[in-house]
Image (cartoon, rainbow, N blue to C red):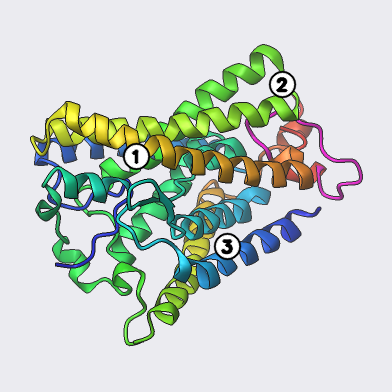
Amino acid sequence: MPDLLLALHIPDGFLSGGIALVTAILAIAAVGWGLRVADRDLDEAKVPLLGVLAAFIFAAQMLNFPVAGGTSGHFLGATLAAVLLGPWLACLVMTVVIATQAFAFADGGITALGANVLNMGVLGALLAGVALGAAVKAFSPGRGAFLALVAVVSWLAVMVGAAATSVELALSGTVPLTSALVAMLGVHALIGIGEAVITVGAVSAVLAARPDLVALGRFEPASGTPDVAAAGGTA
Amino acid sequence: MKTTVLVAVGLALAVGLATAVSPFASGSPDGLEKVAEDQGFLDRGGLHAVQEGSPIPDYAFPGIENEFLATGLAGFVGTLVVFALGYLVALGLTRLRGPRETRTGRQGTPA
């Protein structure tokens, strides 16, 4: 039996056909909307940013860190992608990462691809989009408060993904809901801390270099930035 | 910082992490795998037929015996492939729109 690298990556065989289908439809709907948003709004100056963000998330997902009890976890990245690009472009970035993992690295299933995109990408990205978008609109947080919110939301995004995975497994008849939820949320409460640390670190770095590229924030460009006008200053 | 510099720094960081750090990542079963093991449904999982021919199964570059090198090379290649895919998908979306008549053009269009 091959070593299945999972984290939240569901392999084929864990989900029933019906649940795989429903989650695939939801994922396709989100990605379809993401394509529509990209077609409408994506600035050519942002094209390399989508590539580099996908590459960073792929790389960071390889770095499993130990959590309690002989278990490991890794970064997911949906919140980071949503903070930097907005929730819908984030869905596209996460789909590129998760589909490559499934097809090239045999990590995460093919019939479970929709569920994985939904759990690790769409749900977290939309949560971050709604929660951070509302917070920024309501009280225009400064950098410190914004980063604190990013920490909370990235932890929550991992928990929501773990909860969704548990529900899908339970509805598939693979495992009883309560035991799945208790076990999955217990482990992912710790993994979510790693997610928050990495997300806050990455967002801080971008805030220091190019605050105007933080899509969900409303930060002024750093003074002396040469190509701010070309990179979305008009949006 | 120019966007191109930021992208270059980000890509270098990603490639560096995937190549040099990933071989030292924890090999313990992760979240779902551990839960599946504990709850006795791990053996339900398997590879899809499509995945039997995966170019780099389980993040180990084929044909390399040294595990550290195999993982590092898988990370190196994978990160560049994902960068290229993300870039090309995004580029395709901006190009599908046709010649640029957006933003700058829109502002200058007479009512």
User: What segment is highlighted magenta in the picture?
Assistant: A214-228
Chain for mark 3?
A: B
Circle on res. A187: 1
Magenta span has A84?
no
Camera-nearest label, 1 or 2: 1
Residue B56 visible in the displayed image: yes
Helix, strand or loop at mark 3: helix
Q: Which residue is mark 2?
A: A141
Q: Position of residue A37 (x, y in %)?
A: 50, 35
- The reply to the same-chain question for discs 1 and 3 is no
- The reply to the same-chain question for discs 1 and 2 is yes
Which amino acid does the dot numbered 2 rest on? Pro
Which amino acid does the dot numbered 3 rest on? Ala
Q: Position of residue A139 (x, y in %)?
A: 69, 13
Q: Which residue is mark 3?
A: B14
Q: Position of residue B32 (x, y in %)?
A: 27, 46
Circle on res. B29: none
- The tag earlier along the polypeptide, 1 or 2, is 2
In the image, taking residue A136 as reference, residue A74 lies left or right, namely left
Of residues B71 and A226, which is closer to you in this image?
Answer: B71
Camera-nearest label, 1 or 3: 1
In the image, taking residue A196 as reference, residue B37 lies left or right, namely left
Magenta span has A218?
yes
- The reply to the same-chain question for discs 2 and 3 is no
Residue for point 71% across, 33% down? B106
